[in-house]
Amino acid sequence: MEPYLAIFFLTPFFQSCCAWSVNNFLMTGPKAYLIYSSSVAAGAQSGIEECKFQFAWDRWNCPERALQLSSHGGLRSGKESIGYHYRDPLTTANRETAFVHAISSAGVMYTLTRNCSLGDFDNCGCDDSRNGQLGGQGWLWGGCSDNVGFGEAISKQFVDALETGQDARAAMNLHNNEAGRKAVKGTMKRTCKCHGVSGSCTTQTCWLQLPEFREVGTYLKERYHKALKVDLLQGAGNSAASRGAIAETFSSISKKELVHLEDSPDYCLENKTLGLLGTEGRECLKRGKALSKWEKRSCRRLCGDCGLAVEERRAEMVSSCNCKFHWCCAVRCEQCRKRVTKYFCVRKEKRERSGGGGASRKLKRKL
Protein backbone atom coordinates (compact mmCIF):
# COMPACT_ATOMS: atom_id res chain seq x y z
CA MET A 1 0.00 0.00 0.00
CA GLU A 2 1.73 3.17 -1.15
CA PRO A 3 1.94 6.18 1.16
CA TYR A 4 0.07 9.37 0.36
CA LEU A 5 -0.76 12.66 2.02
CA ALA A 6 -3.99 13.72 3.62
CA ILE A 7 -4.62 17.40 4.29
CA PHE A 8 -7.13 18.26 7.00
CA PHE A 9 -8.68 21.66 7.63
CA LEU A 10 -10.80 21.72 10.80
CA THR A 11 -12.83 24.73 11.90
CA PRO A 12 -13.12 24.75 15.71
CA PHE A 13 -16.06 27.09 16.04
CA PHE A 14 -18.34 26.05 13.22
CA GLN A 15 -21.81 27.37 14.03
CA SER A 16 -21.29 26.97 17.80
CA CYS A 17 -18.56 26.86 20.42
CA CYS A 18 -18.57 23.07 20.63
CA ALA A 19 -19.18 22.08 17.02
CA TRP A 20 -16.52 20.63 14.83
CA SER A 21 -16.71 20.42 11.07
CA VAL A 22 -14.41 19.21 8.34
CA ASN A 23 -14.41 21.90 5.69
CA ASN A 24 -12.35 20.07 3.17
CA PHE A 25 -10.31 16.95 2.47
CA LEU A 26 -7.62 17.15 -0.17
CA MET A 27 -5.85 13.90 -0.90
CA THR A 28 -3.37 12.74 -3.45
CA GLY A 29 -2.78 9.07 -4.15
CA PRO A 30 -5.02 6.09 -4.86
CA LYS A 31 -8.59 7.26 -5.45
CA ALA A 32 -9.83 4.15 -3.66
CA TYR A 33 -8.96 5.80 -0.36
CA LEU A 34 -11.49 8.57 -0.93
CA ILE A 35 -14.19 6.21 0.35
CA TYR A 36 -12.57 6.32 3.78
CA SER A 37 -12.30 10.11 4.08
CA SER A 38 -15.60 10.68 5.90
CA SER A 39 -14.78 7.92 8.40
CA VAL A 40 -11.35 9.42 9.01
CA ALA A 41 -12.92 12.84 9.59
CA ALA A 42 -15.53 11.41 11.97
CA GLY A 43 -12.84 9.47 13.80
CA ALA A 44 -10.66 12.54 14.29
CA GLN A 45 -13.68 14.44 15.61
CA SER A 46 -14.60 11.66 18.04
CA GLY A 47 -11.04 11.72 19.32
CA ILE A 48 -11.21 15.43 20.08
CA GLU A 49 -14.63 15.07 21.73
CA GLU A 50 -13.24 12.31 23.93
CA CYS A 51 -10.26 14.52 24.77
CA LYS A 52 -12.63 17.24 25.99
CA PHE A 53 -14.53 14.70 28.12
CA GLN A 54 -11.42 13.19 29.69
CA PHE A 55 -9.94 16.60 30.58
CA ALA A 56 -13.15 18.44 31.51
CA TRP A 57 -12.02 18.87 35.13
CA ASP A 58 -8.29 19.23 34.55
CA ARG A 59 -6.33 22.47 34.46
CA TRP A 60 -5.77 21.93 30.76
CA ASN A 61 -9.18 21.01 29.40
CA CYS A 62 -8.60 20.39 25.69
CA PRO A 63 -10.08 23.80 24.75
CA GLU A 64 -11.84 24.13 21.38
CA ARG A 65 -10.53 27.64 20.85
CA ALA A 66 -6.97 26.38 20.60
CA LEU A 67 -7.61 23.45 18.29
CA GLN A 68 -6.06 23.40 14.88
CA LEU A 69 -4.72 20.51 12.87
CA SER A 70 -1.30 21.47 11.62
CA SER A 71 2.11 19.89 11.57
CA HIS A 72 4.83 20.23 14.12
CA GLY A 73 6.97 21.42 11.23
CA GLY A 74 4.42 24.07 10.34
CA LEU A 75 4.28 25.27 13.91
CA ARG A 76 8.02 25.60 14.12
CA SER A 77 8.32 27.34 10.79
CA GLY A 78 5.22 29.47 11.14
CA LYS A 79 3.83 28.17 7.86
CA GLU A 80 0.61 26.29 7.28
CA SER A 81 1.19 22.59 6.85
CA ILE A 82 -0.39 19.30 7.81
CA GLY A 83 -0.54 17.04 10.85
CA TYR A 84 -2.10 16.81 14.28
CA HIS A 85 -1.35 19.59 16.71
CA TYR A 86 -2.64 22.59 18.56
CA ARG A 87 -2.22 26.25 17.79
CA ASP A 88 -0.93 27.79 21.02
CA PRO A 89 -0.45 25.73 24.21
CA LEU A 90 0.67 22.63 22.37
CA THR A 91 3.42 24.06 20.22
CA THR A 92 5.74 22.20 22.58
CA ALA A 93 6.20 18.44 22.62
CA ASN A 94 4.56 17.93 26.01
CA ARG A 95 2.31 15.19 27.39
CA GLU A 96 -0.86 16.98 26.24
CA THR A 97 0.43 16.83 22.67
CA ALA A 98 1.12 13.14 23.21
CA PHE A 99 -2.46 12.51 24.32
CA VAL A 100 -3.93 14.44 21.39
CA HIS A 101 -1.96 12.36 18.90
CA ALA A 102 -2.91 9.12 20.61
CA ILE A 103 -6.64 9.80 21.01
CA SER A 104 -6.93 11.18 17.46
CA SER A 105 -5.18 8.15 16.00
CA ALA A 106 -7.35 5.85 18.12
CA GLY A 107 -10.50 7.66 17.01
CA VAL A 108 -9.66 7.23 13.34
CA MET A 109 -8.83 3.52 13.74
CA TYR A 110 -11.91 2.88 15.89
CA THR A 111 -14.29 4.55 13.43
CA LEU A 112 -12.83 2.79 10.39
CA THR A 113 -13.11 -0.57 12.18
CA ARG A 114 -16.68 0.09 13.31
CA ASN A 115 -17.80 1.27 9.88
CA CYS A 116 -16.22 -1.81 8.33
CA SER A 117 -18.33 -3.99 10.64
CA LEU A 118 -21.43 -2.00 9.73
CA GLY A 119 -20.87 -2.82 6.06
CA ASP A 120 -20.01 0.70 4.93
CA PHE A 121 -17.09 -0.51 2.81
CA ASP A 122 -17.44 -3.05 0.01
CA ASN A 123 -13.87 -4.29 0.44
CA CYS A 124 -14.08 -5.01 4.15
CA GLY A 125 -15.90 -7.50 6.33
CA CYS A 126 -15.54 -9.59 9.47
CA ASP A 127 -12.16 -10.83 10.58
CA ASP A 128 -12.65 -14.60 10.33
CA SER A 129 -8.97 -15.41 9.88
CA ARG A 130 -8.86 -17.47 13.11
CA ASN A 131 -12.30 -19.06 12.91
CA GLY A 132 -12.21 -22.74 13.80
CA GLN A 133 -8.93 -22.45 15.69
CA LEU A 134 -8.66 -23.32 19.37
CA GLY A 135 -8.63 -20.09 21.37
CA GLY A 136 -8.41 -21.51 24.88
CA GLN A 137 -9.74 -24.24 27.10
CA GLY A 138 -13.31 -25.01 26.04
CA TRP A 139 -13.65 -22.38 23.32
CA LEU A 140 -12.95 -21.83 19.64
CA TRP A 141 -12.62 -18.74 17.52
CA GLY A 142 -15.76 -18.11 15.47
CA GLY A 143 -18.46 -15.59 14.75
CA CYS A 144 -17.75 -12.15 13.32
CA SER A 145 -14.80 -10.39 14.93
CA ASP A 146 -14.44 -6.66 14.34
CA ASN A 147 -11.73 -6.21 11.73
CA VAL A 148 -9.21 -4.15 13.70
CA GLY A 149 -6.49 -5.20 11.29
CA PHE A 150 -8.28 -3.32 8.53
CA GLY A 151 -8.89 -0.27 10.74
CA GLU A 152 -5.29 -0.25 11.88
CA ALA A 153 -3.83 -0.48 8.37
CA ILE A 154 -5.99 2.23 6.82
CA SER A 155 -5.73 4.62 9.79
CA LYS A 156 -1.97 4.25 9.76
CA GLN A 157 -1.88 5.20 6.09
CA PHE A 158 -3.88 8.36 6.77
CA VAL A 159 -2.50 9.51 10.13
CA ASP A 160 1.16 8.54 9.95
CA ALA A 161 1.51 9.98 6.43
CA LEU A 162 1.07 13.40 8.02
CA GLU A 163 4.50 13.10 9.65
CA THR A 164 7.16 13.74 7.02
CA GLY A 165 10.07 14.67 9.30
CA GLN A 166 12.72 12.39 10.72
CA ASP A 167 13.64 14.32 13.84
CA ALA A 168 12.76 13.61 17.48
CA ARG A 169 9.45 15.45 17.26
CA ALA A 170 8.29 13.35 14.31
CA ALA A 171 9.41 10.19 16.11
CA MET A 172 7.43 11.23 19.18
CA ASN A 173 4.28 11.90 17.16
CA LEU A 174 4.53 8.58 15.32
CA HIS A 175 5.11 6.72 18.58
CA ASN A 176 2.01 8.28 20.15
CA ASN A 177 -0.04 7.57 17.02
CA GLU A 178 0.89 3.92 17.44
CA ALA A 179 0.07 4.03 21.16
CA GLY A 180 -3.42 5.17 20.23
CA ARG A 181 -3.87 2.24 17.87
CA LYS A 182 -2.52 -0.16 20.51
CA ALA A 183 -5.12 1.21 22.92
CA VAL A 184 -7.94 0.23 20.58
CA LYS A 185 -6.57 -3.30 20.15
CA GLY A 186 -5.82 -3.64 23.86
CA THR A 187 -9.37 -2.79 24.94
CA MET A 188 -11.16 -5.16 22.56
CA LYS A 189 -13.74 -7.37 24.30
CA ARG A 190 -14.13 -11.11 23.84
CA THR A 191 -17.76 -12.15 23.35
CA CYS A 192 -18.79 -15.81 23.44
CA LYS A 193 -21.77 -17.97 22.57
CA CYS A 194 -22.48 -21.35 24.16
CA HIS A 195 -23.14 -24.54 22.20
CA GLY A 196 -24.42 -27.81 23.54
CA VAL A 197 -27.50 -29.85 24.36
CA SER A 198 -30.11 -27.80 26.26
CA GLY A 199 -27.70 -24.92 26.65
CA SER A 200 -25.10 -27.04 28.43
CA CYS A 201 -22.32 -24.90 26.99
CA THR A 202 -20.14 -27.88 26.09
CA THR A 203 -18.15 -25.60 23.81
CA GLN A 204 -18.09 -21.91 23.10
CA THR A 205 -17.34 -19.89 20.01
CA CYS A 206 -15.86 -16.46 20.69
CA TRP A 207 -15.08 -13.33 18.73
CA LEU A 208 -13.61 -9.91 19.44
CA GLN A 209 -15.69 -6.73 19.55
CA LEU A 210 -14.83 -3.07 19.90
CA PRO A 211 -15.49 -1.61 23.36
CA GLU A 212 -17.24 1.71 23.87
CA PHE A 213 -14.83 4.45 22.76
CA ARG A 214 -15.04 5.88 26.29
CA GLU A 215 -13.03 2.86 27.47
CA VAL A 216 -10.30 3.67 24.96
CA GLY A 217 -10.25 7.27 26.18
CA THR A 218 -10.05 6.22 29.83
CA TYR A 219 -7.23 3.80 29.03
CA LEU A 220 -5.25 6.54 27.27
CA LYS A 221 -5.91 9.02 30.09
CA GLU A 222 -4.25 6.54 32.47
CA ARG A 223 -1.31 6.30 30.07
CA TYR A 224 -1.18 10.10 29.96
CA HIS A 225 -0.62 10.26 33.71
CA LYS A 226 2.25 7.77 33.33
CA ALA A 227 3.70 9.29 30.14
CA LEU A 228 7.46 8.92 29.76
CA LYS A 229 9.70 11.89 29.14
CA VAL A 230 12.40 11.15 26.58
CA ASP A 231 15.62 13.10 27.12
CA LEU A 232 17.59 13.66 23.95
CA LEU A 233 20.69 15.74 23.33
CA GLN A 234 20.04 19.37 22.48
CA GLY A 235 20.11 20.00 18.77
CA ALA A 236 19.32 16.44 17.75
CA GLY A 237 18.35 16.90 14.13
CA ASN A 238 18.19 15.16 10.79
CA SER A 239 21.77 13.94 10.43
CA ALA A 240 22.21 10.21 9.91
CA ALA A 241 23.80 9.83 13.37
CA SER A 242 20.99 11.76 15.04
CA ARG A 243 18.30 9.79 13.23
CA GLY A 244 19.94 6.56 14.33
CA ALA A 245 20.11 7.65 17.95
CA ILE A 246 16.50 8.82 17.88
CA ALA A 247 15.29 5.58 16.33
CA GLU A 248 17.22 3.50 18.88
CA THR A 249 15.82 5.52 21.78
CA PHE A 250 12.19 5.22 20.73
CA SER A 251 12.48 1.56 19.74
CA SER A 252 13.43 0.72 23.34
CA ILE A 253 10.11 2.12 24.66
CA SER A 254 6.94 0.05 24.67
CA LYS A 255 4.56 1.03 21.88
CA LYS A 256 1.77 1.17 24.47
CA GLU A 257 3.37 4.06 26.35
CA LEU A 258 2.79 7.74 25.66
CA VAL A 259 5.98 9.74 25.33
CA HIS A 260 6.88 13.43 25.41
CA LEU A 261 10.03 15.50 25.01
CA GLU A 262 9.23 18.61 27.04
CA ASP A 263 7.54 19.52 30.31
CA SER A 264 4.07 21.06 30.30
CA PRO A 265 3.61 24.76 31.12
CA ASP A 266 1.80 25.93 34.26
CA TYR A 267 -1.84 25.74 33.27
CA CYS A 268 -2.89 27.52 36.46
CA LEU A 269 -1.70 30.84 35.12
CA GLU A 270 -2.80 32.92 32.18
CA ASN A 271 -0.10 33.11 29.54
CA LYS A 272 -1.04 35.11 26.47
CA THR A 273 2.17 34.16 24.69
CA LEU A 274 1.24 30.49 24.89
CA GLY A 275 -2.48 31.13 24.55
CA LEU A 276 -3.24 29.80 28.03
CA LEU A 277 -6.29 31.20 29.84
CA GLY A 278 -5.45 29.88 33.31
CA THR A 279 -8.06 28.42 35.65
CA GLU A 280 -9.63 31.65 36.91
CA GLY A 281 -13.34 31.58 36.11
CA ARG A 282 -13.43 27.81 35.61
CA GLU A 283 -16.29 25.83 37.12
CA CYS A 284 -15.48 22.98 39.50
CA LEU A 285 -17.43 20.27 41.31
CA LYS A 286 -17.76 19.66 45.04
CA ARG A 287 -20.81 17.55 45.77
CA GLY A 288 -22.72 14.80 44.07
CA LYS A 289 -23.26 11.10 44.63
CA ALA A 290 -22.28 10.19 41.08
CA LEU A 291 -19.01 12.13 41.11
CA SER A 292 -15.69 10.32 40.84
CA LYS A 293 -12.85 11.09 43.24
CA TRP A 294 -11.13 13.03 40.45
CA GLU A 295 -14.23 15.18 39.92
CA LYS A 296 -14.75 15.76 43.66
CA ARG A 297 -11.20 17.07 43.91
CA SER A 298 -11.59 19.43 40.96
CA CYS A 299 -12.11 22.54 43.14
CA ARG A 300 -8.87 21.89 44.97
CA ARG A 301 -7.05 21.11 41.73
CA LEU A 302 -8.38 24.04 39.69
CA CYS A 303 -8.78 26.62 42.44
CA GLY A 304 -6.93 25.92 45.70
CA ASP A 305 -3.74 24.49 44.23
CA CYS A 306 -3.67 27.40 41.77
CA GLY A 307 -3.91 30.04 44.51
CA LEU A 308 -7.57 30.81 43.81
CA ALA A 309 -10.63 30.76 46.03
CA VAL A 310 -13.84 28.84 45.44
CA GLU A 311 -16.91 31.00 45.00
CA GLU A 312 -20.36 29.52 45.49
CA ARG A 313 -23.07 30.78 43.19
CA ARG A 314 -26.73 29.93 43.49
CA ALA A 315 -28.91 30.02 40.43
CA GLU A 316 -32.42 29.18 39.37
CA MET A 317 -32.61 26.91 36.34
CA VAL A 318 -35.76 26.81 34.23
CA SER A 319 -36.37 23.70 32.15
CA SER A 320 -39.18 21.84 30.46
CA CYS A 321 -40.74 19.05 32.52
CA ASN A 322 -43.82 16.85 32.89
CA CYS A 323 -44.18 16.72 29.14
CA LYS A 324 -47.32 15.06 27.77
CA PHE A 325 -48.37 14.06 24.29
CA HIS A 326 -51.71 15.49 23.19
CA TRP A 327 -53.67 14.00 20.29
CA CYS A 328 -52.95 15.06 17.66
CA CYS A 329 -50.07 16.03 17.43
CA ALA A 330 -48.39 18.15 20.04
CA VAL A 331 -46.22 17.80 23.09
CA ARG A 332 -46.97 20.19 25.93
CA CYS A 333 -44.62 20.73 28.83
CA GLU A 334 -44.63 22.60 32.09
CA GLN A 335 -41.86 24.99 33.07
CA CYS A 336 -40.09 23.73 36.17
CA ARG A 337 -37.73 25.80 38.30
CA LYS A 338 -34.90 24.32 40.27
CA ARG A 339 -32.39 25.93 42.58
CA VAL A 340 -28.84 24.80 41.90
CA THR A 341 -25.46 25.59 43.41
CA LYS A 342 -22.37 25.93 41.29
CA TYR A 343 -18.74 26.59 42.19
CA PHE A 344 -16.18 28.72 40.36
CA CYS A 345 -12.51 29.65 40.76
CA VAL A 346 -11.99 33.34 41.55
CA ARG A 347 -9.17 35.53 42.77
CA LYS A 348 -9.11 35.64 46.56
CA GLU A 349 -9.29 39.45 46.71
CA LYS A 350 -12.34 39.42 44.43
CA ARG A 351 -14.08 36.93 46.70
CA GLU A 352 -13.29 39.03 49.78
CA ARG A 353 -14.79 42.14 48.16
CA SER A 354 -17.96 40.28 47.26
CA GLY A 355 -18.30 38.85 50.76
CA GLY A 356 -17.77 35.29 49.59
CA GLY A 357 -21.22 34.91 48.10
CA GLY A 358 -22.80 35.18 44.71
CA ALA A 359 -26.03 36.73 43.52
CA SER A 360 -28.80 34.42 42.46
CA ARG A 361 -29.41 34.35 38.75
CA LYS A 362 -31.95 32.77 36.44
CA LEU A 363 -30.64 30.39 33.84
CA LYS A 364 -32.86 28.96 31.15
CA ARG A 365 -31.98 25.57 29.79
CA LYS A 366 -33.96 23.60 27.28
CA LEU A 367 -34.13 19.85 27.82
Image (tube, rainbow, N blue to C red):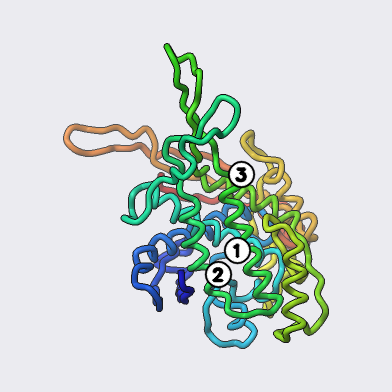
Q: Are marks 2 and 1 in contact (CB under 8 Å)?
A: yes
Separation (CA) of disc 1 from disc 3: 41 Å
State the image quarter where residue 261 is shown: bottom right
| Residue under pointer 1 | 177
Badge 3 marks a residue whose secondary structure is strand
Residue at position x 71%, y 59% in the image: 346
Front residue of 206 and 264: 206
Q: Amino acid at mark 3?
A: Thr
The crowding category of the residue bearing disc 3, from other C-alpha atoms within 10 Å (few below 14, some 14 to 19, many at least 20), is few
| Residue under pointer 3 | 341
In the displayed structure, would residue 172 be above or below residue 52? below
Front residue of 298 and 211: 211
In percent of width and height, residue 156 lies at 52, 64
Between disc 2 and disc 3, whose residue precedes? 2
In the displayed structure, would residue 94 be above or below residue 147? below
Is residue 318 something that shows in the picture? no
